[in-house]
Amino acid sequence: MVRLFPLRGVVLFPEAILPLHIFEKRYRQLTADALDGDRRIAMALPLTDSDDEPQPIHRVVCVGVIHNENRLPDGRYKLILKGEGRLRITSEVSMGDKLFRRALVAPIDDEIRCDGAFTRRMRRAMLLGQLRRLSRSPTDPAAALYRHLRDRCTDSAFSDVLAYSLPSPIEVKQRLLETPCVDERLELLEDELTRLAGKPERQTGEREFSEN
């Protein structure tokens, strides 16, 4: 069973780092419960912008582990959450005396094509090349992301950190989270980086890559 934190505009991925500012009473309770237990929180993307409760959410979520926490004097928290794995919600459980939502889940394991090792290496090289071309200076976020990904050892971690860091529409990120096949994720990322490379630059000359 996992604690659910629905949050608009955010899709967490395994290996990604998410800073959180916790201020609502129900999520302060969720955080305290996590810190007293396994330190895990599952981030869930709402299906709509409606304020109706309970918010409908996507059934594929990412569970993260609290790596660092700071409780403020007024009861708020500042957290660093690191993504751990994909999960599929099988059912939600009664909230009981809790203010936050919980669910029963099943893990989603990565899949790879047995004959796809060469293609994965080529796609990684192409994706890194595209990131380099998007870098305007050694200090901009795309350049930092390139350096971070260049030496990543697993194709899964490479695809997930890149997916989290790209300034893509939230629907694209959720689709990537819901794609268990690493080869398919790399294909989708190649298409997405090609699309981003064709977009005009912002007035600042920088693209909004996440500095994961």
Image (tube, rainbow, N blue to C red):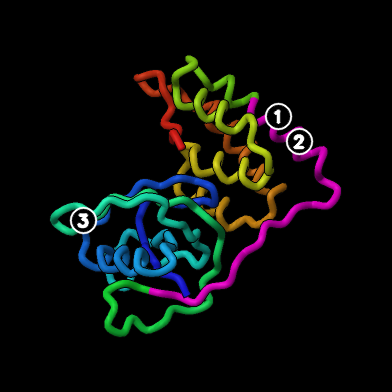
Tally of numbered discs: 3
Q: The disc labelled 1 sits on which kind of residue? A: Ala
| Rendering quarter of residue 29 | bottom left
Which residue does the numbered mark 2 point to in the structure image?
121
Give me the C-alpha separation between circle 1 and circle 3: 43 Å
Q: From what the image shows, is residue 121 above or below residue 26? A: above
Q: From what the image shows, is residue 36 above or below residue 179? A: below
- The magenta segment is 102-128
Please tell me whether residue 8 belongs to the stretch shown in magenta. Answer: no
Labelled pair 1, 2 in contact (Cβ < 8 Å): yes
Q: Residue at x 58, y 58 (%)?
A: 178
Q: The disc labelled 2 sits on which kind of residue? A: Arg
Labelled pair 1, 3 in contact (Cβ < 8 Å): no
Q: Residue at x 37, y 84 (%)?
A: 94
| Residue 207 coordinates in the image, percent (x, y) | 43, 27
Q: The disc labelled 3 sits on which kind of residue? A: Arg
| Residue 68 coordinates in the image, percent (x, y) | 37, 50
Q: Is residue 41 visible?
A: no
Q: Earlier in the sequence, mark 3 or mark 2?
A: 3
Q: Residue at x 49, y 62 (%)?
A: 61
- Residue at disc 1, secondary structure: helix
Give me the C-alpha separation between circle 1 and circle 2: 6 Å
Which residue does the numbered mark 1 point to in the structure image?
125
Q: Is residue 112 visible?
A: yes
How busy is the neighbourhood of tag 1: few (under 14 within 10 Å), some, or many (20 plus)?
A: few
Please tell me whether residue 125 belongs to the stretch shown in magenta. Answer: yes
Which residue does the numbered mark 3 point to in the structure image?
76
Q: Is residue 179 left or right of residue 114?
A: left
